Amino acid sequence: MNQQRNPFEFEAANNLSHEEILDYYIDDYNYSRFINTKRNIFLQGARGTGKTMALLYNSFRIQYKKMKTNVNFDKIGVYIPCNTPLFHKKEHLLLQDNFKASLITEHFLVLSIVNAICMTLIDIEEIQDLSNEINNSLKSDMEYILGVELIKDRSFLQAMSMFSEKESRNTQRIINTQKEDEFYQDSLTFSSLVMPFFNCLSKINCFKDSHFLLLIDDAHDLNSYQKKTINSWIAYRDHSQFSFKVATAESQPDFSTSTGGMILEGHDFVSVDMLKPYQNRTSEFSNLANKIVQKRLNKYGISKDIKDFFPVSPSFESDINDAREIAREKARKKYDGGTGTQISDYIAKYTRAEYFRSRHSRANLPPYSGFETIVDISTGVIRNLLDPCYWMYDAELSNSEGKAVEFIPHGTQQSVLVTRSNKLWERLEGLDKTDVDCNRDQAVFLFNLFENLMIHFKERLMSELSEPRTVTFVITVRNPQMMEKVDPILNIAQKAQLLYTRPGKDKRTGKRVIVYVPNRLLLINKGLDPHGQYASASIKAIDIVNAAYDNKKIPLPVPRNKDSDDNEDTIQFDLFDN
């Protein structure tokens, strides 16, 4: 394998070849077990968390190539991307009647699904070997059900694919010429097209017991009618032949149906959060990150262990050891005669805080380096993991004079991380220029908010609070007037991947909370600790508003008791406690 190619090239999963998907996908961690059940599943997670990769890997096109022999037809994954021209059709906007708009939406949706099924199955040998008798019989059945004539001299799947394309074009022509009344009496639905199509497929021997997994990707790009239509299908009671696996970047999807009802988690579907815990080196995301990067290194003939390929700065290791001894001494004084657990817990909590506190206010930024730091900065998002690795390797490749890159020096790591952090702050400051959903005022409010959050986290780090390295927050005292101002700018920040949300549970009260996690790459520019800790700062909604709209500092709380390990402003939380 040519090592001169960057192992960390990252493309949108849709742009990868089937071979690359098979090479790069880590099956152990990406929820294949959920996708391959007969239950309806919502895969939720920000862009870059692996939703598309998980769906593509489990599509039958990829699995068929993987199986090669002894093909199993029990589960047939059909990949259906929503970010396509057909899904973005706007004909429904020509109509004032919501019912008619809903009919048109479902009509286009079912045509897309049938075409996707055809394209998934059309090239497999078992289908190509069907006799003319079976093909003609299946075509005859669908012609009778639909009241149309399918094209002659084509296989059943080819004919159905061409029918869906032609019907879509004809519908568009009718609607655009304002003759939509001609359309409604023959509009197609899931029950009138897709389910009869499944029944026909079940007459083919290899599909007689198959369950079809309809893998709907980028559902956040759908319009409201399309989302409600898919939710209505999910509400069907009989899912013996099919189930839906819906991937969305929305943290709070709309679960309403086209008939005004709601689908319920646990009853109609299971929700799977693609963002994984990542706070320590044994976390689920840390394990996944190790496998992803090690697999890429191995693929390109680089045999080094990840820790050796991304070495930690020796000065950082030395200074951390010094900070550990300072923390140990403070623990001995604080817990005179205390248990070994108290002392070790204190050291674990405060060592990194001591390191950052001990740095001179005018010192350069810390020597950010080492694979654990890269994982921390990713904020649990695969794309954020690969991005700095790519630029680090590229920097070394540029200076290698044709020699193989054997490792990434800690100086290169720091330089790239600082540069990428600076670029993210530049993007944040001019967000109205790069994000169509953000105006200039909102960009200013967001910049103010993140600046004040960083100041707040810095002050915490230098304080005597019990959770000084907290770099996440929850919003308290959420009165409606304040949240009307907070929610719009936080939603923009999430869409821009400057902010992530994670479900959590307050350990003290047991209540579920939304944990807001700033993109940790932002912390580098401010000299903060990207590792963070298992706690979130409690910030009142009014303080978020004042920070964003009036550029006011977020108040730093006063500890309840200087000898206490508890602060009223901090929430200890469990992530992903379902």
Image (cartoon, rainbow, N blue to C red):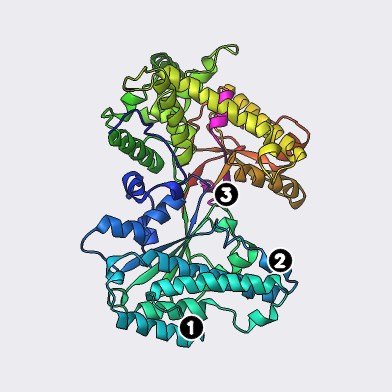
Return the residue at label 3. Answer: 513
At horizontal 77% and vertical 38% (from top left) the residue drawn is 441
Residue bearing the label numbered 2: 93
Is residue 137 visible in the rendered image? The answer is yes
- Give the alpha-carbon distance from disc 1 to disc 2, as whole Å: 30 Å
Is residue 28 positioned above or below 189 on the image? above
Q: Are marks 1 and 3 in contact (CB under 8 Å)?
A: no
Can residue 345 be seen here? The reply is no
Residue 320 sits above or below residue 108 on the image: above
Label 2: state its secondary structure.
helix
The residue closer to the viewer here, 267 or 344, is 267
Q: Which residue is drawn at the image coordinates 45% and 74% (left, top)?
A: 160
**Front-most of 527 and 139?**
139
* Residue pointed to by mark 1: 149
Instruction: Give amino acid for label 3.
Output: Val
Q: Left of 345 or right of it: where is 476?
A: right
Which comes before the other along the chain, label 2 or label 3? 2
Q: Is mark 1 on a helix, strand or loop?
A: loop
Q: Are marks 2 and 3 in contact (CB under 8 Å)?
A: no
Magenta span includes 174:
no
Is the residue marked by circle 2 packed among few (<14), some (14-19), or many (20+) residues within 10 Å?
few
Residue at figure coordinates x 67%, y 67% from the top left: 91
Residue occupying the far left of the picture: 70
Q: Give the range drawn in magenta.
A: 502-525
Sequence-first disc among 1 and 3: 1
- Give residue 354's position: percent from left, percent from top: 49, 19
Screen quadrant of the N terminus? top left
Q: Is mark 3 on a helix, strand or loop?
A: strand
**Alpha-carbon span between mark 2 and mark 3:** 37 Å
- Decide if residue 569 is on the left or right side of residue 2: right
Disc 1 versus disc 3: distance between alpha carbons?
Answer: 56 Å
